[in-house]
Image (spheres, rainbow, N blue to C red):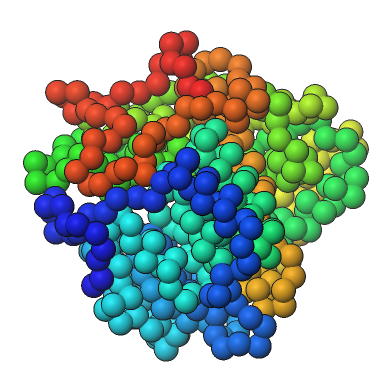
Amino acid sequence: MKTTGKPIETSKTTRRQFLARSAGVTAAVGLAGNLSVARSAYVQGSDALKLAVIGCGGRGTGAAKDALSTQGAVKLVALADIFEDRVQRSLKALTSVSEISGQIDLPKDRLFVGFDSYKEVMAMDVDVVLLTSPPAFHPMQYAAAIAAGKHVFMEKPVCLDGPGYRLAMETNKLADAKNLKVVVGLQRRHQQSYVEGIKRIHDGEVGDIILIRTYFNMPSNGPNYQRRPETVSELEWQIRRWGKFTWLSGDHIVEQAVHEIDIANWMMQDETPVKANGLGGRQVRTGCGNGQIFDHHFVEYIYADGARHFAQAKQQPGGWSHVSDNVHGTKGTVTVGSGPYGTGGSATYGGGESRAGEMQMANPYVQEHQDLHDAIRNDTPLNDGYHGAKSSMTAALGRMATYSGDEVTWEEATQSERALAPGLDQYTLASTPPVLPDDEGNYPIAIPGTTKAW
């Protein structure tokens, strides 16, 4: 297991400092924009695409398996994570899958641990990096990957706040300038039922769009009242439970419901709303051990032409669970996608026509990697980074509205200087995180009408 930097005694793993998030990374991006594509970029006709994973949790391991399940020669040559146990768990899980085990080439010296372990990957001869770390780290790691000349698969969300959005958009431009391909894990953009349904909307089947309704209402396991043990640092505790903390995940409206928010923007020809208002709160996630995120949100997004998008997002046990995307226009309605997480092969149109069960779709979680690999091999344009950043920021706009209880404009949100994790470039696991619990183990939460969220 390879580590870098000076060890810090805070549990089993070696700890690292991070590459600069804003000023330093932005400067590096600007400099790299004048350089040619790094030597590691894939060249047509060369051998297998070499992949590396940065962030070895469940999603990172799953994304690696999906990427290795594509057609064409690919191999996994590096794993990196803050925590050693996650690297080892991912390695064990991947090598146990017989269908892909022959595509894994992971000697110990290509297993990297620590806060700056991703920088080791950027220095390697790899073609594609899979950025599947907690979302707070995506903008800076994306910037580092493109500066290093790597093609990128990046899990959603792309950004959580105004500074992260602006950095991501700068990086998108640099990716284009360096002819690097980018796919974001909004897999519905690569799913047949959605591609067909959205095309019919864009072709005018529903007329002018008046209203979009989306739902990402999912069950949860309910509250967890576990307290941090004294043997674990506060920052490590939060990172290992990143989904419960706004500064790491953006809240579930950003981390999860961004799928449906992306569909709404897609329906609107990738326009973004001009403003949003909403409401939300915590009825189930209360008490110590439950972080700081809300358990329900309802947002009204308003577009420049007056169209509305009503977005529901819920993580509560029991009650109505539902995922779908619905558009109402001057000529009719369309519901695109159904089934668990919207991955069912169906589209229902206003005239009663239904395609449910008819489509024999490729697995969209594999297809998005296939599309990336094909674009690299064939040198065709592909950059999901633009709509990925816009939709992630649209979701963050909704969080700002529900947290504050105010109407928030797109300009206010995107131009805000407020970062959820200021100084992230200086963190080690001995650092103090942006939020701390009180004596009862409760973390600060937003209070609508009081909180300034942007």
Residue 171 visible at all: yes
195 or 321, which lies in front?
195
- Residue at image position (38%, 84%) is 105
Q: Residue at x 55, y 26 (%)?
A: 416
**On screen, 327 above or below 100?**
above
Q: Is residue 45 above or below residue 437?
A: below
Tell me which corner region of the image, top left, top right, bottom left or bottom right, holds residue 365. Answer: bottom right
**Which residue is depicted at the point 85% across and 48% down?**
202
Residue 132, given in percent of the width and then of the height, sits at 44, 58
Asked whether residue 340 is in view, the answer is no
Where residue 448 appears, as percent x and y from the top left, is 46, 15
- Count of numbered circles in the view: 0
User: On the rendered structure, is 113 left or right of 78?
Assistant: left
Q: Residue furthest top?
A: 449
Q: Which sits in the foreground, 252 or 214?
A: 252
Give x and y (percent) for residue 427.
29, 44
**Does 55 sit above or below residue 44?**
above
Quadrant location of residue 323?
top right
Q: Is residue 326 left or right of residue 98?
A: right
Q: Position of residue 282 (x, y in %)?
A: 38, 25
Residue ranking furthest to the left: 230
* Relative to 449, 364 lies left or right: right
Q: In this image, 8 relative to 447: left or right?
A: left
**In percent of the image, x 52 and y 35: which residue is there?**
163
Between 260 and 118, the residue placed more toward the observer is 118
The quadrant of the picture occupied by the N terminus is bottom left
